[in-house]
Amino acid sequence: MRAADRLDLFGNTVNLAARLGSIAGGGQLALFADGLTHPAVGAALRKRQATVPAKVKEIAWKAQHRLYLRHRHLAAHGKCPQQVVTAVGRELLGFIWAIGMEVETTGRTARPAAA
């Protein structure tokens, strides 16, 4: 992050935590590249993913890759930012549905039926 990124309208430096309100809100989490490379963050992400089924991780990775490319493609072709976000959001909903169906079907097969 450059020093100019930390200046407010009056030229004063701004606390990074104060700036997070505009980046993430309502239960969202904002991660910066500096934080992702920290060993503790990587260990926490690996620990959280250890309990996730392989098929769900596969769908999530496919979603991340496709949505990134889709966003870049639409933005590069001059689409309105709101249209880009809406299109990517709709595709994200499809991936969320696929993960939900995968979890629901594996949950049914993993548990014995009630008698």
Image (tube, rainbow, N blue to C red):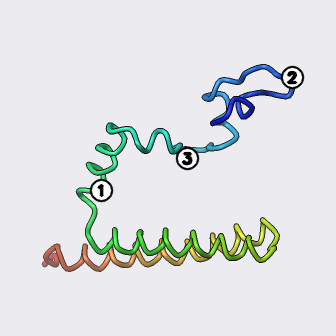
Q: Position of residue 3 (x, y in %)?
A: 69, 29
Query: Which quadrant holds the N terminus?
Result: top right
* Callout in the foreground (1, 3): 1
Three-letter amino acid code of the residue under disc 3: Gln
Check disc 2 and report the residue beneath it: 10
Distance from Cα at disc 2 to Cα at disc 1: 43 Å
Q: Residue at x 60, y 44 (%)?
A: 26
Q: Residue at x 29, y 56 (%)?
A: 49
In primary-sequence order, the first of circles 1 and 3 is: 3
Q: Callout 1: helix, strand or loop? A: helix
Q: Position of residue 100 (x, y in %)?
A: 40, 73
Q: Residue furthest top?
A: 12
Q: Callout 3: helix, strand or loop? A: loop
Check disc 1 and report the residue beneath it: 49
Of the pair 13 and 96, the residue shown nearer to us: 13
Three-letter amino acid code of the residue under disc 1: Gln
Check disc 3 and report the residue beneath it: 28
**Callout 2 crowding tier (Cα within 10 Å): few <14, some 14–19, many ≥20:** few
